[in-house]
Every structure is written in C-alpha cells, then in structure tokens.
Amino acid sequence: MAIWFQRIFLLLLVSCCASSDFLENPDFESPPLNLPTNSNASSVSLDQNSTLPGWTFQGTVLYVELPDTGHAVQLGEDGKINQTFIAKGDELNYILTFALIHAGQNCTSSAGLSVSGPDSNAVFSYRQNYSKVSWQSYSHNLGSWGNGEPINLVLESQAIDSDSDTNSTCWPIIDTLLIKTVGVTLVQDSGNLLINGGFESGPGFLPNSTDGVLIDAVPSLIQSPLRQWSVIGTVRYIDSEHFHVPEGKAAIEILSNTAPSGIQTATKGTSEGSRYNLTFTLGDANDACRGHFVVGAQAGSVTQNFTLESNGTGSGEKFGLVFEADKDAAQISFTSYSVTMTKENVVCGPVIDEVMVHPLGGTASVKPTWLLLIFALLYVAVL
C-alpha cells in the first residue's frame, strides 16, 4: 500500500506546482495598441508607435492573423520579443511550452527561433513531417529559480546565412506560450531506484493541442524539460488524453528519422557489484504508427535489443533485463533504431513508460510515507 501513497504524493507535488499564470498575453490575443492605419491586414508590422501588451519588442516583428486560430507573432530579420516575469514559491524549475507555426511553402531558407532564459538557450525550427497540423509544440527548461527572482524570457529570430535572400526566407511564427513549474527535488516512487521513471514530470501541454510536445536533444539531465532524463535526437512527450499511455498521464514516444533518438538517466542508490532488474513497458501511442520497433536498452554495462510489432492501435508489452551495477549510479538508456511513419507521413515511433529498477530478488527499502502524504495534503489545502 505504501507504493500508492508515494505515487499520490508525487502526483500532488507535481500538480500543485503547475501554473500557467506567469505570462501576460501569452497567446497574443490582446492586440497591439496604436496599430498603423492598415491594421485590417492579415499581418501588421509593429513600429515604434505600437505597443504589444505584456511584451517588449525590437527589429522586424509582425502581428499576424491565423486562419481559425486567432493571432500570433512573426519574428522577421533581427526580430525579438521579451517579457520578464517573477518566480513564485520556493526553488522551482520553470518549463516553457510554446507553439511554432509553419511559416510557408515557398522558402529558399528557414530561420530558426532562439529561446533564452537568464542562463539557458536553445534554437528551434519547425520540422517537416513531425505533426499532422501546421503548428508544433516545443519545450525548453528555463532553469530553477527562487521566490521573487526575475526571469527574462527572450524569443528572437535566428540569424541566417549572409548569402540567403531575406525576402524568400520563412521567419518563425510563435503562438501560445505556457509556463509550468516543477519541484527541483522529485520524490522516488517506492521500490524504484529511478526518479521520474513514469515520465509524469515534464513540460505542460498547450490548450487544444493534440500532437504532444516535441523535445529536441538536451544532453544535460538538469537542463532537460523531461525531468531527470536527457534526450538524444527528438522525442515526443505524449498525454493520456490524446494517446495510448501505458500507465499514468504521460509517456515518451521516441522519434527516429535520419538518426537514432533516445533518452537516458541514471539510478539513485544502487550499490557497485549488486544485481538489479530493469523493467519497462514498450508499446505504441495509438497514433496509427505501424511497423517493426527495435529499441536498444542499456542498464549499466548490459545492452539488449527489444522488438515489438506495432499495429498502431495502442499495444503495449512489458520487458526486462538483469544487470550488475558497476557504479553507485548506473546509466539507464533507451534508443530507437526504427524509422516509422504514419499514413499521414508523420514521424512516429515506440512508446516507453513504467521504467523501474529494483534489486534482484526483492524491492528497495520503503521509508515511511505518512508524514509526506500529510504534508502534501496540507500544502494543497492551503493553496
């Protein structure tokens, strides 16, 4: 029974710290003030007389109207917008999710989008064949901050090659932004020597989004929006509302296109020379992804390939391997070597969930969780 108490506590800890109230005008539906006289056009270039509520801007910035989805901002050459918000509560991780929209078909080149926090930066580009719709959700970890600290969020168009024609360049279009906070210290599930083995702690999902959230390569566990997991290549963070998730509310779909992709973490509390059992669920996301999945799992110095024939309707199967820890922190990773596409020509792949490591022949020691549970319930009650 204690395992359920710890799961409840973990879910309460993650959910009570989630919020989308940090940014002003995050969906750009509050229109600019002092628009030029041609403000009825589908796109309006903002100038020194314009004010975009909640945001400051410089360079070429356009306020654009989107078919059936409201408004967004396009960053042209040297275009930049930024907003400073204030951290709330104790030390928390601030994870950004945002929508990047396909800017057009007739492009000789496409400019990327640079997303920065006070000590973080990453560049994103709209990826062909990674969604069914004309926009994609991406995520970026802005870092951990304490109560009252200012966090300056900057989005700017990435410089293109000097030989490129700026008139035929597709510049990035940004829509809805969401900030989610997650506790810096996550609680281990009882009996599991991995943190966030069920992938419940990750980026937030945008309203009306049905395609999950893309997470590009992040080599650092600390900087990753998928808490305690680094990312190789590209993965999709999926929710149980729109996909088949084996357990809980979220899972990872590994997307391999031109090169293998995967995720990696490390155990907490293993002992060198002791034997352990790694178990996980391998399946598909119920997104019409049919094919032969090949996933390589690594636990310490042991590697093994696992296969699954997917019919794309939400299958899942548990697998496992035994390994001997050669260090106090054993590396755990999953890599997909399968390149699969849906009939709509969208990149898809195997789903990984319920990743657990426990001592062979027993479970890890379970510490009393009553005080933790009571603390979590009291914390939620006072919110």
Image: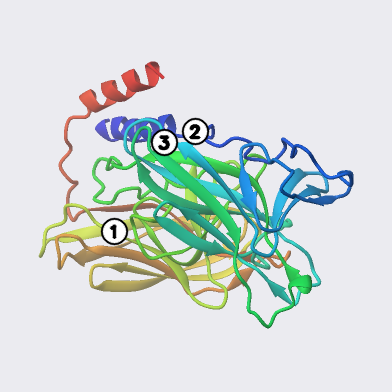
Mark 2, residue position = 19
Q: Number of numbered discs present? A: 3
Front residue of 295/93: it is 93
Q: Amino acid at mark 2?
A: Ser
Distance (Cα) linking label 3 and label 2: 11 Å
| Residue extending farthest bottom | 163
Camera sees residue 34: yes
SS class, disc 3: loop
**Dots 2, 1 in contact, CB < 8 A:** no
Q: Quadrant of the C terminus?
A: top left
Question: How far across and down, in percent of the image, does residue 35 sit?
Answer: 80, 42
Question: How far across and down, in percent of the image, does residue 336 sit?
Answer: 47, 70
Q: Counting other residues with Cα less than 10 Å from the Cα at mark 2, is it few (<14), some (14-19), or many (20 or more)?
A: some
Q: Earlier in the sequence, mark 3 or mark 2?
A: 2
**Dots 1, 3 in contact, CB < 8 A:** no
Mark 3, residue position = 87
Q: Amino acid at mark 1?
A: Leu
SS class, disc 2: loop
Distance (Cα) linking label 1 and label 3: 37 Å
Q: Nearer the viewer, mark 1 or mark 3?
A: 3
Distance (Cα) linking label 2 and label 1: 34 Å
Q: Counting other residues with Cα less than 10 Å from the Cα at mark 1, is it few (<14), some (14-19), or many (20 or more)?
A: many
Along the horizontal axis of the image, is 152 left or right of 12?
right
Q: Quadrant of the N terminus?
A: top left
Q: How is the image coloured?
A: rainbow
Q: Which mark is residue 278?
A: 1
Q: Earlier in the sequence, mark 1 or mark 3?
A: 3
Which residue shows up at 66% across the image and 58% down it?
Answer: 59
**Dots 3, 2 in contact, CB < 8 A:** no
Which residue shows up at 51% across the image and 77% down it?
Answer: 259
